[in-house]
Image (tube, grey):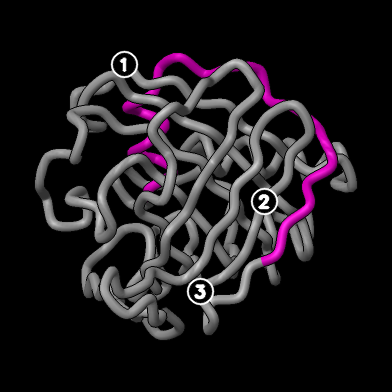
Amino acid sequence: MTPWEIDALEIANCNCDPGCPCQFNSLPTHDNCEAAVGFVVKSGHFGDVRLDGVKIALTAYWPGPIHLGNGTIQLVVDSAATPAQRDAIETIVTGGETEDMATMFWVFSKMAPNKLETLTKPIDMRIDMESRTGYVRVPDVFEMDVEPMRNPVTGQEHRARINLPHGFEYRVAEVASGTTRTFGAISLEKNKSTHSHICRVYMNGQGVIEHAA
């Protein structure tokens, strides 16, 4: 296999209640799963191709729980990326050059046989894990805004984390509240003040890199 590695920040918004039952091996809040995600690669490579600074976005929809499959994914790679970088990202996100079940990319790809053509568009993104804030803007595809959860009585910011010692996506994620508006081929209709998380994604073709996660 071609060796690869990415150290990235991820910001995600799905249609589940805060905390997301999927993180605890439970069924999704509304029976199906729909999500928008953004990544910015701090450093990384695919073989000899450097991936530092590449931005990635995607929307995904499953008619039921993810493990039942039949999902649809729309991948977007930032227009500033080179053709070689786009090819590398497309391979990683579709589970290529990866051991079976090793990453969330591999699992999501296998559970989403309906892959739309990869788009090349400018991606505007900001991710601040400490403040649990950020946004993603992809023209004609989606806009996501993320902010801290708030106490329903006092309105004060509330902080919660998810720790998955054996997770295939991250080890620790900050939980937040997100809203996504879609304009593209995949329409997400339930993502309004729903679960979001911000995390560090540090992995290679064998899975999460333990010593750094």
Q: CA distance from mark 2 to mark 1?
A: 26 Å
Determine whether, in the image, residue 48 is placed left or right of residue 158: right
From the viewer's side, name the closer residue of 100 and 175.
175
Dot 2 and dot 3 residues touching (CB under 8 Å): no
Query: Which residue appears at 61% of the width and 56% of the height?
Result: 39
**Is residue 56 shown above or below 207?**
above
Q: Identity of the amino acid at label 2?
A: Val
The quarter in which the C terminus is drawn is bottom left
Residue 72, image x, y percentages: 44, 20
**Is residue 51 shown above or below 56?**
below
Dot 3 and dot 1 residues touching (CB under 8 Å): no
From the viewer's side, name the closer residue of 14 and 95.
14
Secondary element type, mark 3: loop
Is 115 colored magenta in this rendering?
yes
Q: Which mark is nearer the camera, 3 or 1? A: 3
Q: CA distance from mark 3 to mark 1?
A: 32 Å
Residue that label 3 marks: 132
Q: CA distance from mark 2 to mark 3?
A: 14 Å
Residue that label 2 marks: 136
Residue 156, image x, y percentages: 39, 82
Q: Quadrant of residue 58?
A: top right
Q: Which mark is residue 70?
A: 1
Q: Which segment is the magenta one?
A: 104-126
Q: Identity of the amino acid at label 3?
A: Arg
Dot 2 and dot 1 residues touching (CB under 8 Å): no
From the viewer's side, name the closer residue of 160 and 120.
160
From the viewer's side, name the closer residue of 197 and 25.
197
Of mark 3 and mark 1, the one earlier in the sequence is 1
